Image: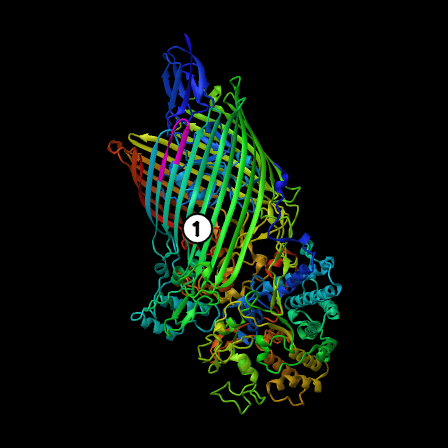
Amino acid sequence: QEVQISGQVVSADDSQPLLGASIRVKGTANGSVTDMDGSFKLNVPQGAILVFSYIGYLNQEIEVRDQSFLKVALEADVQVLNSVVVVGYGTQKKESLTGSIATMELTTKENQPITNISNALQGMPGLHVNLSNSMPGVDRARIRIRGVGTLNNSDPLVLVDGIEYPMDELNPDDIASISVLKDASAAIYGSRAANGVILVTTKKGNDRSQVNYNYYFGVQKPTTLPDAIWDPIAYMKLKNEAALNSGKTKPQYSDAQIQEYEEGMSSDPYLYPASNWFDIALENGYVQKHNLSVSGGSDKFKYRLALGYLDREGVIIGPNNHEKKYSIGLNTSAKVNKKLEVGLTLNGYYRYYTQPSYTNGSFWKYLMRTLPIMPDRLEDGSYGYTWLRTSGRNNWEHPTMIAKEGSYKKDVQRFLSTVYANYKLPLDINYHVKFGIDKYDGYLKRFIPQMVKKQSKTGQLYNWNNPATAPRVYNNDYNDLNIHFYNTLQWQKVIAEKHDLSLMLGASYDKFGNSSFGAQMTGYLDASLTALDAGTERLDIFGNSTKDVLMSYFGRLNYMFDEKYLLEAAFRYDGSSRFAPGNRWGFFPSLSAGWRLDKEAFLEGVSVIDLLKLRASVGILGNQAVPLYSYENSITLGHNYSFGGQLASGAAATAYADPSISWETTTTYNIGVDLDLWESKLSITADYYKKRTEGILRTVNLPAQVGNLSGPKQNVGVVDNSGYELTAQYRNQLGPLQYTLRGNMAYNENEVVDLDGQILYSDGTNLPTITQEGYPMNSYFVLDAIGIFQSDDEVANHAYQSKNTRAGYIKYRDVNEDGIINGDDRVLVNSSSVMPKYTYGFGVNLEYKGVSLSADFQGVGGVKIYPTANLAFPFNNGANATWDWVHDSWTPDRPNASLPIVTESTGKRDNFQNSDFWLRDGSYLRLKNIQLSYNLPSAWLAKLKIQRMSVFVNAQNWLTFTKYKDFDPESVLNASTLYHYPMLKTFSTGANITL
Amino acid sequence: CDPDLLDTQPENKYVESNFWKSKEAAYAALTACYAPLGYSGVYGGDATPLWEETATPNSYNETNSMSFNALASGQHSASTGGVISSRWNHCYSGIGRCNTLLARIDEVEMDEEEKVRMKGEAHFLRALYYFILRTYYGDAPLVLDPPVREHSDLPRTPASEVIQQVLTDLETASDVLPWSYGSSDLGRVTKGAAMALKARVLFYEASPLFNPQNDMNRWKTAMEAAKAVMDVADEAGYDLYPDYRALFLPENEHNEEVIFDVQFIYPDGGNSFDLICRQYNTNAPLLDLANAYLMEDGLPSDLSPLFDAANPYENRDPRFYATVVFPGDTFMGEEVSETRFAITGFGQKKYSIYDEEAAPADKADLKSKQSETNYIVLRYADILMMYAEAKNEFSGPDAEVYAALNALRTRVGMPVLNSGHSQQEMREVIRHERRIEFAGEGLYYNDIRRWMIAEQVLDGPIYTWDKKQLEIRKFDKNRDYWWPVPQAELDLTDMEQNTGY
């Protein structure tokens, strides 16, 4: 006897309806799937057992007795993550995805001291995430997806809940998941998609009321600092040696001065200091964070409210290295009636950070330039100045003074507010409209007082900075408003049971407006008043204002036949104001397909395979990231001159423009396979891709004879990126021990295919690189060092290098055999570009009776770095040197030393010309994070009405394996000096409580 | 959506298509032609012309500012950068702007006579920038149209053709420019400036380095060009300024001796002459220069009864005290100690406002780009010296040669030069006189190049005031007379490099 039964399938976690859940009569092929509301209807025999299944959830079996309506709440299968994946303008089931999309659930990063979400993406397959600056307030990572295919902005497009917004302007605790669209799946974002697209989804409310509070406190210190010589005598002796070796005939410090110093050191630390400036000017930093969230709701109304507070003190001494962030997260939705749902979100920060008044960059530059003979504070507390003269150091930059005097504070309020509505139109068409406002208000206040140093012997006072412009106040107000608006129509239908069809069409409008206004005042009496209007003399007023507009139409068709064959086609048609009329509109189509082999009859019996899917995609993506109005020759003012003692305003073109520029286009191909075995204990994903970017917009360098103009941006150049990615995860348990092993690795090869025959030198970098056809972009292009000259005879018999060259100097290969070493002898050092070839990550989770241990490793390989100048090279421009120059530089007694004879490196002459001698291996493997946590037994907690509570300790960046020792290899990647905020290692501890 | 929404316009800049509309725009464009004069590659930056002196035996740049010490010690190469690349680049900035102005100014509706004069100014400036390129690098691409990409393919034009164009431009300029301007236009190019620059161009072209065939006729044309300036001195108002020291002070700018100078004002276009002279000492005079000053009786120190080894700097040519600060001297109200100028013991006073007396409080600590002293490119004394040298080379030392030299000596109170010198003797006298008269002004570098004596005077050790050796300089006569074309230019073109680089 058959009965008709209907019902609804929801998620037990949040009571959200589950679309596409399958209902099957056990032991038969009879069944159905749920619709958009999670509801189903089915005729079944009385007494039949229904099996409810949904990917990512545990199966549930229910016997049909006399019910006519079943409400089934499926429990999430915690073992199967990412079952539903956020894609452009919608979501898709992971099993039916045809594109290459990496996902991350933020639950996997729980309790880690993540100050910015971009830093947490390290280790995702196909992403190169590089944190080059760790300074509180600006510690954002640079993200590159599947290599670099442009000479312009290579940052991926980031959208938060469908609206373009920087992910680092969100509290990581308010983020639920992240999807990275790496192939043609990004094409729905057209002209902004070529660098990949990152979709951030914020946390939402659910039926179950819940209060969560978590807290951590951590201590931070630099991972690696250069091994500078802080022994003043060793410093002076080596400096003299270097000066003499460099051809100077007068030592920098006389024997009498060194003797006086040595004798005085024990009695007078002010006149004869041995200053270790890394100890003096740096201290341990700390970070602490509170997060509080309340969420809940009903069928009709859901909410999540969250507050966050981050407080962080950096490693620079004094108050000028601080960060505070207050975050708000608000996410609500309401079902007005059966057809209409509306919602509102508000996410973002009020935050500020401080840095030394001469900026963070200057502080590190000066710190890396200081000497052990420089006194810190003198006995009377004034900032000291050494009595010893050092060439190039006319006005010594005192790190303590620069760290502490004055102020630099930037206040930012940035919020993304959105409202949306879903309306059910007839014919199962769902209309979605969303309006977002991204408002950025920044205010920079900078005060530079008069800084004075006192000579330790004579007591004479020296102004460090210019009294004509100090004290001075600099304020700048930033005011950006971006408006985003999109509409979509969605329709889905299963036709004749086997044809699953869905269609989406949409349009959007994005407007970006930036403006700023600033002023500088001087004429302050002292350092006590720092308001703009307390000064008496106007120094400067400045500002700017820009806007640009993007209009788009887009659509997507998904078709699935018999759950086996998947097809997706999408397009976007974008118009951008960044180009001249006639070149504004671009069309970006994509196509992808999948084949579920596990659903085929020939694999039906193979129970070990849960999922086996082949995927392929092709699409065209664009990049519009060129400076505004690059298509017009502009005349700039400010090329002034004076006549009769009065300034006259001068106007001239400084850049050459090409009006015909348009989009860069990237054609991307991807094939992949997804395989789940043994009840998803083992899952493997492998992808191979090839991307070709054409019409690359780049500045064509012009020789100075063309009016010394910077070259035009033109659509020239073709760059290929190809590579593969492999991800694997294995989960199982041994008795009470649950464990997960996971790993991924990605390899990317970059090749410049066509540059119109041109060669770009040091394009966009300060490094000795070249971009040339047939080689990776920004490959190192340097002299070929072939050893160290051991005798003057050897020098005489070799090609001429310079007048100074003698034993102990680096020997360069005379590549063109013309008997002289010069720029023509530079060689392209193969496989050594500034982007790594390999990125990889692996990790382990162990859980045993409430105790869990997780460790994540992350690394890059196949990358070279080229640090120069202060401390990377000895005695550059009056700076110090590192200890290896004391004991490992060439002398007649140390012919096998690894470094050449010690000389002053100022001016990059002789041994310090760009050569592969200084090209270092930037590969590293790092224990990014290790965490031990303990979940308190629920039996205890139940009495306190606490659902869950854990305590944890966490260590970040504590272990790094690398050949590069002078600094942290991650933070010098792509930089030419060591003047950066160093990478930090953090030790943190805290608790996480859910009520 | 309405596609017109995509029509955004720049809110903060002019574009070339709508720029050449007004007289004000034309003047702004002309101002931008002058602007490179103040750039570091030409006569501006912090102290480029003063540092140029450090590439000579006169002084020393310990920190290698703008790579001038690399030039002094023969350690430069095509990749050295510094002044070697900025001079090339900044000259072409000026050339490109002059070319644009000359091509487009006719579109502007304005007084025709004024327009013609403005073109004359641009012709002079273009000539000056090309003359600088020719002087240091030799051959250089000659471009006379507004910048277009196709100019990238131009090879180096032979220097003789460049100079031909320079002379044509100067001819055009001197035909249309006035002798002088009203007070609000002081600093603009005059007819006299065009004539004086022409004299210098011809004078350089006659000199051994630029005249390898030793065409004596070139000395004649140089002599005539200098004489032409002397002949119009009354009309143009040129003469020697009576006070040699005060000639270089900002309060006496635009005096009768100044024919063409580069304008500096604070805060929007100053130089750092005072900072480097007072504090940085990166143009530190060397012992060799100090010893070169004659005693006030006109004899060298080793022959003069006035010389006292214990007080070697007493009773020198008065120009010494107007140019150099030495240990034991008084400077800025204090006695100069041996370490006051720690690099060589000497400091430079010329082109700085600082002198014996303490500076006023608001000027005591002038920093980078705060100095307003104009740099004099061409002064009347140089015209006299060019005339004397050209005439001596062409036809030997006659009375006019003596007269020109003695005018300079008399101005500072040095005894006049007695007749009876042979041509060769007179050549030495003139070279010495030039070195002293123009010490610290950056002219000596091209003088030792012109005369091709650099391998004699630049090669060897240099010394501090107390005879301590600082470094040993080297000069390769087969290479170092000409600067290399910057590596970046070679990378982008098929240009030939100069010999030896």
In this rendering, would A602 be left or right of A681? Answer: right
Give the camera-side residue of B5 and B159: B5
Q: Is residue A893 above or below residue A87?
A: below
Q: Quadrant of residue B171?
A: bottom right
What quarter of the picture does the C terminus of chain B occupy?
A: bottom right
Chain designation of label 1: A
Quadrant including the N terminus of chain B:
top right
Left or right: A277 in relation to B139: left
How crowded pointer 1 is (Cα within 10 Å; few <14, some 14-19, many 20+) is rated as many
Tag 1 secondary structure: strand
Residue A237 location (% of width, % of height): 39, 68
* Span highlighted in magenta in the image: A292-304
Q: Position of residue B290 (x, y in %)?
A: 53, 81
Name the residue beneath numbered marker 1: A411
Q: Is residue B140 visible?
A: yes
Residue A746: percent from left, percent from top? 47, 40
Identified at 46% across, 18% down, the residue is: A32
